[in-house]
Image: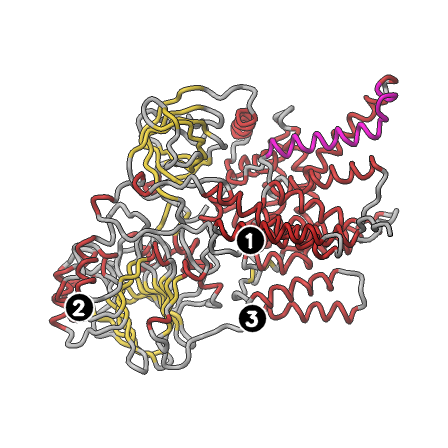
Amino acid sequence: MAKRPWGMRELVAMGLAWLAGLALVQRCERLPTGAEYAALALAFLLLWLWRRRHWLALAGGVAVLAFMQTAVRADLRLMPELHPAWEGRDLVLTGRVDSLPVALTGQGGVPGWRFEFAVEGVGPTGTALPPEVPARLMLLSYQGLQGTQQTRDAPSITAGERWRFTARLKRAHGLANPGGFDAELWLFEQGLRASGVVRAAERLQAAPWWSIDAARQRLRTAIREHVADPGMAGVLAALTLGDQNAITHTDWALFRDTAVAHLLSVSGLHVTLFAWLAAALVAPLWRRSTRLCLRVPGPLAARWIGVAAALGYALFSGWGVPAQRTVVMLAAVAGLQTLGLRWPWPLVLLGAAVVVTAVDPWALMQPGFWLSFGAVGLLMAGGGETGPTWRARLKAALHTQAIATVGLAPLGLICFAQLSAVGLLANLVAIPLISFVVTPLALLGGVFAPLWTLAAWLMHALMAWLRLLASLPGAVWWPPAAPLWAQGLALLGAVLMILRLPWRLRLAGLAMALPLLWPAVTRPPAGEFELIAPDIGQGNAVLVRTRDHALLFDSGPAYAPGADAGERVLLPLLRRLGVHRLDMLVLSHRDGDHVGGAVTLMQALPVGELRSSLEDSHPLRRAGPPALRCEAGQAWAWDGVRFELLHPTPAHYDAALKSNDMSCVLRITSSAGRRALLAGDLEAEQERRLVRREPDLRADVLLVPHHGSKTSSSAEFLAAVQPRVGLVQAGYRSRFGHPAPPVLARYQAAGVPVVASPACGAWRWQSDAPLSAATCERELSRRYWSDRVAPPLPQAEVAGPEWPGEEGW
């Protein structure tokens, strides 16, 4: 009996099996061992031999193959790991600038640039790359360094150039917080296995004129020279070059809040438009040549030249996931038409996803992958025919926009943890304006530069409309995090809502989305409190929640102008937990690593009361909420939990002590007597005086004073507190050497385990549970790309400044 040829069922099963195998790898905490690889190979062989009996065996074999090849590629990408012995040391690196430099501003307002660097050699003579140093790095370079004179408008470092840098490196390490940005995954996806700061530089060779990097750099420079507004120049660079880093942080926030951020990239629509223009220009010219038409029919030639133009544009614009997907789909459609085949659109879309993930298996981890394919799938599934009249066309356009807005809302909420209520109104104007007017003008500006000025003027008008929408009450909604089952149910419900189904089924789809939109929020029971110490780098910020109240002790550091722990860590964490109001913000003292995120928090959330040791003239005391100064003896109770301030006393304000010694010290006590003591940056002398003032300082959890500095955690203080756990919030390889080895030895001698945020990530504990039940985010969310942090190193081995702003890109 003849074997039946593969049909649609087999092709769909193999495509889905491929994606499932890739997804399974991304959930692994570690990659397979040699023995496990052998077992996978045996399973693949058996399934392959069994494929003739049943198509499910073939699908299983494809899933195993996808899992194996992705794991092997991940192993190879992880191999060039920076050896700990090279961290914090000055290394001479020779190589090539491998990306467009991104403008940034460091601490103190010093301008600089961030860029990817392909290392060719290490040492003054540029010897071969040792295995302990990765081949690709993320580097920062600032003004004032020997050999570099950078300005924002004319950077001395440009893409494609060869340089010799003296740089100080550290491993690919980021912050670990619930629902936070995974910088380690981002670095892994980009193939960047270490980061560093340039300390000296020497240009060796200019970029070749013919390189893509040099051409992209010249075009970006030309845009900045012709468009006076840096923000608008950044938008045009994003639309033409795919350089989304050129968009300012403020503008990104506006685009995100109005749900038009998907338009500010080289999207599938832009690539398709470029391919269509190329085909439209080539077709009439091709038909003029009888010889060419006899060799290749005009429509066929125009079709494949359009695909080639789309590929060239996608490569020039950075080869993002939407561009990849569009090029693959255009090539698939062109190939099917050339072969005379007619595949249904779901199979074409699935085939494009398989090809994209075969090229880049980690595209599956990018929100853009799901949003891009989801948008195309929804429009294909729910779209209708366009009528001949303008009313019919307008109706079809509104229908398409409604499908995109409703269908992608759950997916956008899952990916970005927010929902724009004004997204439909914003996109009704933004989609046609950006896609069909601004983007073509931006592209044609490369030929006739004044068109960039017109495009910038139109974007100014659009930005005014978006700001008006964003200022409306309830324009953006941040629901709490929902469980996985609610996310999956909402995605299925979105599909039901946009399909042409009876209204009963559509309403059922709306009901299925409700658990995602209004998830249940867990809170501590009455009389108990929850303590969360997020991973914020070098600084302090601790969230304390009772049943109906929330208090934040300190607000973390400012990483760079416009980037702080409030915006990057604390606000996402609070919104994920369903905290939309702070009943009290306590700022222990004036140091920047404790108050850096306060302004952002007070602008974004209602704050009931501010308590601090700040001087009366400090700007934060006039920022909005009622401000009181911390004084020993102040106490209050929330939901059966007692809060007490133990330091400073009124006399300390008169004595004009230094900032650290004025730190507010807060004690929290549950109804069952469990305690936490938050000590700010209190130093040894004031610790001893506090011991003499307070008869009972015992606490279960101690926020280690001054991040573990050797000027704090005196023996007398530890003996009085007798903590069962010490928490250290400090930066990874902090230049201050926190926590200091003598302090760690003191805690060890007292039998107190120390939990440091670089190794733990966010630490979470509820007072009605044993301390052994406390969780570390790095353990909960560990994946094979996660950094395995070494124990704290002695201060003598810690060197090198931290990246201003590295805590999230």
* Image: 543 above or below 396: below
> Residue 342 at x, y = what percent?
84, 44
Give the labeled residue for mark 1: 39
Give how far apart the Cα atoms at labels 1 and 2 are: 67 Å
* Image: 612 above or below 183: below
> Residue 536 at x, y = what percent?
36, 55
Indicate which disc, 1 or 2, sits on the residue closer to the N terminus.
1
* Image: 340 above or below 253: above
Q: Which quadrant of the structure image shows residue 140?
A: top left
> Residue 242 at x, y = what percent?
58, 37
Q: Residues within 10 Å of mark 2 (few under 14, many from 20)?
A: some
3 and 1 marks in contact (CB < 8 Å): no
Going by the numbered disc 1, the residue's amino acid type is Ala
Q: Toward the viewer: 289 or 724?
A: 724
Give the labeled residue for mark 2: 649
Q: Residues within 10 Å of mark 1 (few under 14, many from 20)?
A: few
Q: How many marks?
A: 3
Secondary element type, mark 2: loop
Instruction: Give the magenta part as a residue range.
Output: 292-317
1 and 2 marks in contact (CB < 8 Å): no
Give how far apart the Cα atoms at labels 3 and 1 are: 41 Å
Give the labeled residue for mark 3: 519
Query: Can the viewer see residue 379 in this picture?
Result: no
Secondary element type, mark 1: helix
